[in-house]
Image (cartoon, rainbow, N blue to C red):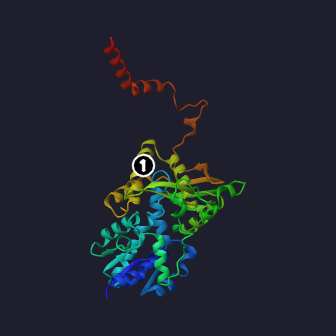
């Protein structure tokens, strides 16, 4: 009997995939669940996977690796997809797929299986990673093969097979959670005109119900990586956990986004990224102090390409490796402390300092100074504006 490694979450799709794989392919199913910070969702998975028909299940704590090797590189790049999405699901999939390949080699499996739909982005992210790391492995994508066409159909399949599932036809949201964020799709959210209801949120207090007083937190960075909160050094996991608590309590990090999927359609999702939103705002503020104008502007332009590469599943591509090298060079002096104010959904930098600050108060002052001669500006403007002047003189001569 051939073995197949299934990316298993215990949710609706992967719960019904186990018996489907056995019935339609005859595989021995090895389930794999990556602990990326889902919390209480992991507790029942071992018993549930075996009861559903898996021969074995691996559950690996990958939280530190996820933060250090996947979240922080994207944070340092400043990558945001379509101005809003902080890529929480996008950069989780390559790590999961990489570990699935490792387990496939260990178990001598011949195939990989995922529960991503044929309409979504995750199918691309899983499969590009497998192609990059193990091109010999077969990939099975049930949503592209089976008769099930909707989440309602999947629920009916689960009921017929006696499978416990965490959703109903009334509460049918598709969610993805990790230490960085939680996403919500489906149900009433499929109408972009429907506002998210307060009971939708899992990590975050609705902004209007957040405390009426500001919360302040100081974040220390070393070469673009956050290392301490309020002067206390801590592990990346402890730091993310604490920022999620602070951000969530103050309604920070809720985004409703109509995004352009890679497969060509638009979709609507609601994302909660409390700690990540704080880190992005703080990191941006520190870069504004420590990066020169040309580097900062080029980095902002490349961040758009970086975000698209990650969103599209090209984590293990050569071009991303090249962009990572650029980002690492830019982060050499991105060290210092940023003071953030959190209040009813807002997240604002109110102070920043760094030993590598390029801000010179003697130059920037509106008062008298001995460094900058304002007379020099006249010659600079004459040279900087020379092309405009030449063009204007030409146009005047042509009108005569």
Would you say residue 79 is visible in this rendering? no
Q: Whole-percent x and y of residue 345?
A: 63, 54
Left or right of 1? Residue 270 is: right
Q: Residues within 10 Å of mark 1 (few under 14, many from 20)?
A: many
Q: Quadrant of residue 171?
A: bottom right
In this rendering, the answer to whether 206 lies above or below 135 is above
- Count of marks placed on residues: 1
Q: Which quarter shows the N terminus?
A: bottom left
Left or right of 112? Residue 291 is: right
In this rendering, the answer to whether 191 lies above or below 33 is above
- At horizontal 40% and vertical 26% (from top left) the residue drawn is 385
In this rendering, the answer to whether 387 lies above or below 55 is above
Q: Whole-percent x and y of residue 390?
A: 35, 21
Secondary structure under tag 1 reads: helix
Q: Which residue is mark 1?
A: 299
Q: Which quarter shows the C terminus?
A: top left
Q: Quadrant of residue 132?
A: bottom left
Would you say residue 110 is visible in this rendering? yes
- At horizontal 48% and vertical 77% (from top left) the residue drawn is 156
Q: Whole-percent x and y of residue 249?
A: 66, 61
Residue placed most toward the observer, 398 or 195: 195
Residue placed most toward the observer, 138 or 87: 138
In this rendering, the answer to whether 332 lies above or below 50 is above
Q: Whole-percent x and y of residue 97?
A: 39, 72
Residue placed most toward the observer, 382 or 245: 245
């Amino acid at each position: 009997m051939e073995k197949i490694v299934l990316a298993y979450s215990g949710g609706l799709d992967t719960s019904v995939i186990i018996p489907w794989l056995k019935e339609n392919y005859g595989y021995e199913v090895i389930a794999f669940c990556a602990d990326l910070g889902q919390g209480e969702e992991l507790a029942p998975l071992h018993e549930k996977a075996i009861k559903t028909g898996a021969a074995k299940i691996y559950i690996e704590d990958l939280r530190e690796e996820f933060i250090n090797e996947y979240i922080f590189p994207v944070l340092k790049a400043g990558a945001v997809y379509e101005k809003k999405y902080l890529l929480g699901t996008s950069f989780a999939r390559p790590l999961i797929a990489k570990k699935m390949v490792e387990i496939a080699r260990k178990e001598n499996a011949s195939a990989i299986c995922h529960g991503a739909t044929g309409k979504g982005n995750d199918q691309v992210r899983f499969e590009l990673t497998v192609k990059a790391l193990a091109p010999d492995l077969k990939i099975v994508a049930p949503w592209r093969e089976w008769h099930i066409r909707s989440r309602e159909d999947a629920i009916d399949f689960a009921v017929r097979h006696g499978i416990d599932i965490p959703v109903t036809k009334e509460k049918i949201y598709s969610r993805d959670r990790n230490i960085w964020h939680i996403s919500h799709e489906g149900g009433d959210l499929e109408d972009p005109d429907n506002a998210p209801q307060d009971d939708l949120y899992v990590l975050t207090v609705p902004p209007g119900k957040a405390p009426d007083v500001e919360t302040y937190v100081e974040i220390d960075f070393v070469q673009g990586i956050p290392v301490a909160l309020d002067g206390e050094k801590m592990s990346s996991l402890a730091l993310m956990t604490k920022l999620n608590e602070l951000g969530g309590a103050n309604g920070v990090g809720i985004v409703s986004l109509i995004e352009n999927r890679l497969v060509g359609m638009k979709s609507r999702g609601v994302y909660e990224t409390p700690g990540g939103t704080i880190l992005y705002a703080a990191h941006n503020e520190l870069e504004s102090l420590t990066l020169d104008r040309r580097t900062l502007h080029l980095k902002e332009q490349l961040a758009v390409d970086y975000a698209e590469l990650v969103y599209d599943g090209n984590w293990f591509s050569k071009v991303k490796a090249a962009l990572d090298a650029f980002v690492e060079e830019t982060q050499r002096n991105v060290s210092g402390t940023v003071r953030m104010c959190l209040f009813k959904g807002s997240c604002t930098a109110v102070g920043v300092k760094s030993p590598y600050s390029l801000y010179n108060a003697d130059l920037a002052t509106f008062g008298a100074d001995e460094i900058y001669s304002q007379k020099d500006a006249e010659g600079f403007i004459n040279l900087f504006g020379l092309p405009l002047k030449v063009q204007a003189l030409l146009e005047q001569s042509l009108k005569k």
